């Protein structure tokens, strides 16, 4: 069977399961170890030997397994990262978070002195790695409670040839460093009904759901690792706005803050300057 025939048959079947053509192309490209999408199109009229592997991977896609968990690849701000079921798949909102933070750092620290940056809940490592690439003179630390997630982050740190210090800790490492910048995409979902089924079925719940015991915002706000001033940026859920306002009032004596929207016009980011 030629690749074109197989591709068209998978598109036809995929429509029944709401699978888009782009995901099918990425899947085939990965299984065949093709360099890129251009290589895929160049092979459309070639005979495909490993049809079974492609169909097996497609069955996983049909069952709802996220594409990134099948290919073990996720794209983030132009780079490729390794992911598996132990970490969340990076989203476009988190790309917006990092882009916004880079802008804020350049505005707030125009001389780019040697900053101390902490990423709380490193997950796959995409935030910390991108910040280290952007600010190579900065000290970039990261914490993560999940040992399996730490292994994923360390693999990505090694693959991207950057220096990021990773500590197994709930929020802050056991050191005496005062951090100039705190960034986090913590668990912020209140209710399971707010989550797509594929996310609920396959992605780690500990990285998704906020609770009284798993409130990273509170743990960060009330910690003494924050320098003065300290720039903080968080990814949030829109329904946390009122709770976070109350928490900031309880935690800080002098501060300024700003809520901003994501590309879908939902309140998604909280920026704080603790003075």
Image (spheres, rainbow, N blue to C red):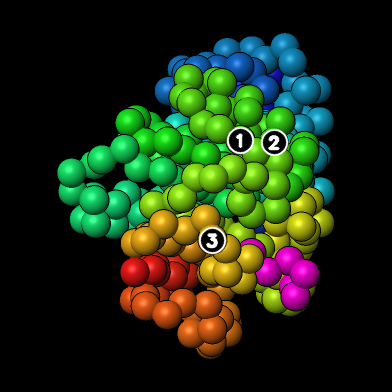
Q: Earlier in the sequence, mark 1 or mark 3?
A: 1
Q: Which residue is mark 3?
A: 224
Residue found 54% across the figure and 45% down from its top: 176
User: What's the residue at 46%, 50% (across, down)?
Assistant: 178
Q: CA distance from mark 3 to mark 2?
A: 24 Å
- Residue 136 point in image, percent of width and height: 34, 30
Where 119 falls versus 59 (above or below)? below
The quadrant in which residue 55 appears is top right
Is 243 drawn above or below residue 24 in the view shown?
A: below
Mark linked to residue 150: 2
| Helix, strand or loop: magenta stretch | loop
Mark 3 secondary-structure assignment: loop
Per the model, the C-alpha gap separating discs 1 and 3 is 19 Å
- What is the residue that sits farthest to the left in this orientation? 111
- Look at the image and say whether residue 15 sits in the magenta stretch: no
Q: Are marks 3 and 2 in contact (CB under 8 Å)?
A: no
Q: Nearer the viewer, mark 1 or mark 2?
A: 1
Q: Secondary structure at mark 1?
A: strand
Residue 239 x, y percent position in the rendering: 57, 82
Closest to the observer: 79 or 209? Answer: 209
- Which SS class for mark 2? helix
Q: Which residues are magenta?
A: 211-216
Q: Is residue 267 above or below residue 230?
A: below
Q: Quadrant of residue 270?
A: bottom left
Instruction: Please tell me which residue lies in front, 180 or 71.
Output: 180
Q: Is label 1 or label 3 in front?
A: 3
Q: Which mark is residue 166?
A: 1
Q: Earlier in the sequence, mark 3 or mark 2?
A: 2
Q: Earlier in the sequence, mark 1 or mark 2?
A: 2
Q: Say if mark 1 contacts mark 2, CB within 8 Å.
A: yes
Q: Which numbered tag is attached to residue 261?
A: none
Towards the viewer: 159 or 22: 159
């Amino acid at each position: 069977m030629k690749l074109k025939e197989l591709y068209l048959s998978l598109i036809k079947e995929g429509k029944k399961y709401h699978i888009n053509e782009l995901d099918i192309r990425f899947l085939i490209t990965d299984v065949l170890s093709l360099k890129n999408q251009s290589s895929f199109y160049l092979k459309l009229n070639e005979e495909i030997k490993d049809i079974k592997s492609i169909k097996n991977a497609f069955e996983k896609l049909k069952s709802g397994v996220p594409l990134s968990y099948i290919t073990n690849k996720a794209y983030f701000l132009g780079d490729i990262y390794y992911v598996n079921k132990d970490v969340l798949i990076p989203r476009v909102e988190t790309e917006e978070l990092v882009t916004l933070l880079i802008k804020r750092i350049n505005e707030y620290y125009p001389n780019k002195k040697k900053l101390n940056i902490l990423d709380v809940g490193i997950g796959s490592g995409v935030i910390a790695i991108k910040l280290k690439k952007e600010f190579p003179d900065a000290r970039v630390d990261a914490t993560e409670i999940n040992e399996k997630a730490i292994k994923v982050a360390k693999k990505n740190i090694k693959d991207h040839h950057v220096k990021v210090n990773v500590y197994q800790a709930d929020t802050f490492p056991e050191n005496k460093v005062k951090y100039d910048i705190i960034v986090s995409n913590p668990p912020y979902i209140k209710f399971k009904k707010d989550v797509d089924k594929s996310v609920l079925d396959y992605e780690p719940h500990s990285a998704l759901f906020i609770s009284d015991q798993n409130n990273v915002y509170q743990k960060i706000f009330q910690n003494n690792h924050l320098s003065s001033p300290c720039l903080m940026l968080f990814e949030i859920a829109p329904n946390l706005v009122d709770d976070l306002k109350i928490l900031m009032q309880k935690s800080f004596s002098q501060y300024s803050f700003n809520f901003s929207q994501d590309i879908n016009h939902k309140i998604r980011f909280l920026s704080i300057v603790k003075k």
